Image: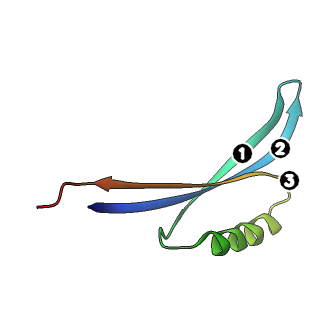
Amino acid sequence: MRKKAASVLKIGCEYGYDEYGAHCRYLHFNVNPEANDKDLLEAVNAIVGMIYLPLHSVERLDSCELTKEG
């Protein structure tokens, strides 16, 4: 049985580059685990529109605790 479902939206924004690649800052937002991907992407677009740094990545991290029924 699933318990304590949680989702985190992780947005990476580039703030610099060097010979190793892009340097990013990550923003983490707790989101409703029932939210669909389309709604989350719309939220990301709104958030990124307010940030002056270029978008590098978007990740959805889901987790839950599994317990034995009965």
Residue at image location 69% in from the left, 72% down from the top: 43
Q: Indicate left or right for 34 with 66 as reference.
A: right
In the displayed image of the protein, which residue is found farthest to the top? 19
Asked if disc 1 and disc 2 are in contact, CB closer than 8 Å, the reply is: yes
Q: Amino acid at mark 3?
A: Pro
Residue beneath disc 2: 15
Q: Indicate left or right for 16 with 67 as reference.
A: right
Dot 1: what SS? Answer: strand
Residue beneath disc 1: 25
Residue at image location 77% in from the left, 69% down from the top: 45
Answer with mark 3 or mark 2, whichever residue precedes in sequence. 2
Asked if disc 1 and disc 3 are in contact, CB closer than 8 Å, the reply is: no
Residue nearest the observer in this picture, 62 or 20? 62
* Quarter that holds the N terminus: bottom left
Residue beneath disc 3: 54
Asked if disc 3 and disc 2 are in contact, CB closer than 8 Å, the reply is: no
Answer with mark 1 or mark 2, whichever residue precedes in sequence. 2
Q: Nearer the viewer, mark 3 or mark 2?
A: 3
Dot 3: what SS? Answer: loop
x and y, in percent, of residue 35 in the image: 54, 73
x and y, in percent, of residue 61 in the image: 54, 53
* Quarter that holds the C terminus: bottom left
Quarter location, residue 38: bottom right
Dot 2: what SS? Answer: strand
Residue nearest the observer in this picture, 29 or 63? 63
Q: Amino acid at mark 2?
A: Tyr
